[in-house]
Image (cartoon, grey):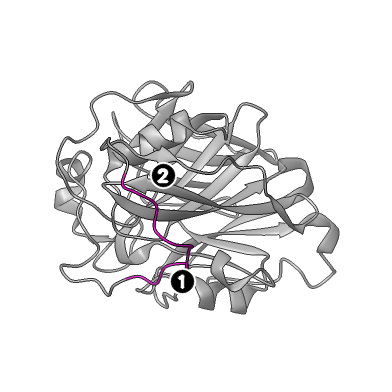
């Protein structure tokens, strides 16, 4: 999602699309339409019982929902932190679509990460293999970090960032959606709807990355959905969205991967540790 630096603070509570006109996203073909639900709030229509294993420590599912009287499908990936390797890649000189990032790196999963400006520079703080780029948000937003091979997800409003050499990978986004299993208060009341990408932690400490298929989600819709779902979400953070939203998996069913419409300069990449070989991890985003 491209933005100029001068707009960072105003965008914290009024997100808009990555560009004024976005192509219509492709959606998963579903069964015959269900009758519209009599509520504007998103409602889960299928419990997350059907998880497919992508690789040891990596599983994914497709969830159906009703949001703003439209049927929606969310693609979700769930990670066991001890069984995966995670990296942030950043290349403002040569952005790629999420699918291209995956094909070039060979990662099991790739998801778009932080907001970026018109020069493809990351907004907020980004840490890739221990190297820091940009500046931390202050007083708003959140930070997903890989600290000593364990995930953390903090609200910068209550826990400001402090430099920590133990953090090797990190991305910041805004706004926080869920804290302690409850939707965050004060989310925008406007009707801006986009595709959304998010990262979450459940109460068992597992990491979830998700992307919505359609451009129907207000921020408060997504927060309410995640908090009321059976995913047992503890914390959730909105990442960059709109045309930048994408999540691509190698070898998964076609409907479980969503490419970004636009090229993005930074992504989160995940490998199953069991599948790593000596050449894994050689991919560099700095070429």
Q: Which residue is mark 1?
A: 259
Q: Is residue 133 magenta?
A: no
Where is 145 relative to 259, above or below? above
The residue shown at (51%, 60%) is 111
Q: Secondary structure at mark 2?
A: strand
Neighbor class of circle 1 (other Cα within 10 Å; few <14, some 14-19, many 20+) is: many
* Left or right of 223, for residue 63: right
Dot 2 or dot 1: first in sequence order is 2
* Left or right of 17, for residue 214: right
Q: Nearer the viewer, mark 2 or mark 1?
A: 1
The residue shown at (48%, 68%) is 258
- Please state the horizontal and vertical placement of residue 18, each as a whole percent of the image: 25, 63
Q: Which residue is mark 2?
A: 172
Neighbor class of circle 2 (other Cα within 10 Å; few <14, some 14-19, many 20+) is: many
- Please state the horizontal and vertical placement of residue 131, each as a whole percent of the image: 53, 53
Residue 151, by quadrant, is top right
- Please state the horizontal and vertical placement of residue 156, each as a whole percent of the image: 38, 29
Can residue 125 be seen here? no
Where is 119 relative to 201, above or below? below
């Amino acid at each position: 999602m491209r933005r100029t630096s001068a707009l960072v603070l105003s965008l914290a509570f009024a997100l808009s699309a990555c560009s004024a006109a976005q192509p219509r996203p492709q959606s998963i073909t579903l069964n015959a339409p269900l009758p519209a639900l009599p509520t504007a709030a998103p409602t889960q229509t299928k419990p997350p019982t059907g998880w497919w294993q992508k690789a040891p420590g990596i599983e994914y599912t497709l969830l159906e929902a009703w949001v703003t009287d439209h049927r929606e499908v969310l693609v979700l990936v769930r990670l066991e932190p001890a069984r995966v390797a995670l990296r942030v890649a950043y290349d403002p000189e040569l952005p790629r679509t999420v699918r291209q990032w995956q094909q070039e790196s060979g990662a099991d999963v790739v998801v778009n990460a932080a907001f970026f400006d018109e020069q493809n520079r990351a907004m907020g703080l980004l840490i890739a293999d221990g190297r820091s780029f940009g500046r931390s948000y202050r007083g708003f937003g959140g930070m997903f970090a890989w600290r000593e091979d364990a995930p953390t997800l903090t609200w910068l409003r209550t826990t400001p960032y402090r430099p920590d050499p133990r953090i090797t990978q990190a991305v910041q986004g805004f706004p926080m959606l869920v804290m302690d299993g409850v939707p965050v208060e004060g989310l925008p009341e406007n009707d801006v709807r986009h595709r959304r990408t998010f990262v979450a932690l459940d109460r068992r400490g597992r990491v979830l990355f998700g992307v919505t298929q359609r451009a129907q989600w207000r921020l408060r819709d997504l927060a309410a959905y995640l908090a009321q779902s059976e995913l047992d979400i503890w914390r959730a953070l909105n990442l960059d969205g709109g045309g930048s939203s994408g999540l691509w998996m190698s070898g998964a069913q076609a409907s479980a991967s969503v490419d970004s419409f636009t090229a993005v300069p930074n992504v989160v990449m995940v490998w199953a540790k069991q599948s790593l070989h000596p050449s894994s991890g050689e991919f560099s985003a700095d070429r």
